[in-house]
Image (spheres, rainbow, N blue to C red):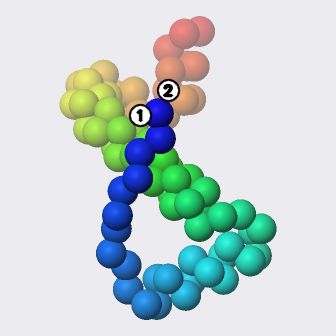
Amino acid sequence: MNKVITVRITDELKKDLKELKKLDNRSVSEIIRDSLRNYLLLKKFKNLRKQVIPYAEKTDLFTDEDIFELSK
């Protein structure tokens, strides 16, 4: 179910959104939804990364190459 959220933005941000709307041929709502979705995904990723870093430090597994090397 869709919900309406009211957000206050600066005039400059509103102007930028209007320009992007024209460039991308998308609605402001679509742009904001995509931006919020991307922000939330990035925050989740960063939080997961914080949880994994201590394990990585203990095992010296930091990169994909480290994992692949271990699996050989």
Q: Give coordinates of residue 34: x percent, y percent.
A: 56, 53
Q: Is residue 64 visible?
A: yes
**36 left or right, relative to 46:** right
Q: Give coordinates of residue 45: x percent, y percent.
A: 39, 39
Q: What residue is drawn where x is 56% and y is 83%?
A: 16
**Residue carrying label 1:** 62
Could you tell me if the residues under marks 2 and 1 are in contact, i.e. CB atoms within 8 Å? yes
**50 left or right, relative to 43:** left
Q: What residue is drawn where x is 68% and y is 73%?
A: 21
Q: Nearer the viewer, residue 38 or 56?
A: 38
**Residue carrying label 2:** 66
Q: Give coordinates of residue 56: x percent, y percent.
A: 31, 28
Q: Give coordinates of residue 65: x percent, y percent.
A: 56, 29
Three-letter code for the amino acid on which mark 2 is drawn: Asp
Vertical placement of residue 69 versus 14, above or below: above
Vertical placement of residue 31 versus 70, above or below: below
Q: Nearer the viewer, residue 26 or 34?
A: 26
Q: Residues within 10 Å of mark 1 (few under 14, many from 20)?
A: few
Q: How far apart are labels 2 and 1 at the CA level?
A: 6 Å
Name the disc covering residue 49, or none: none
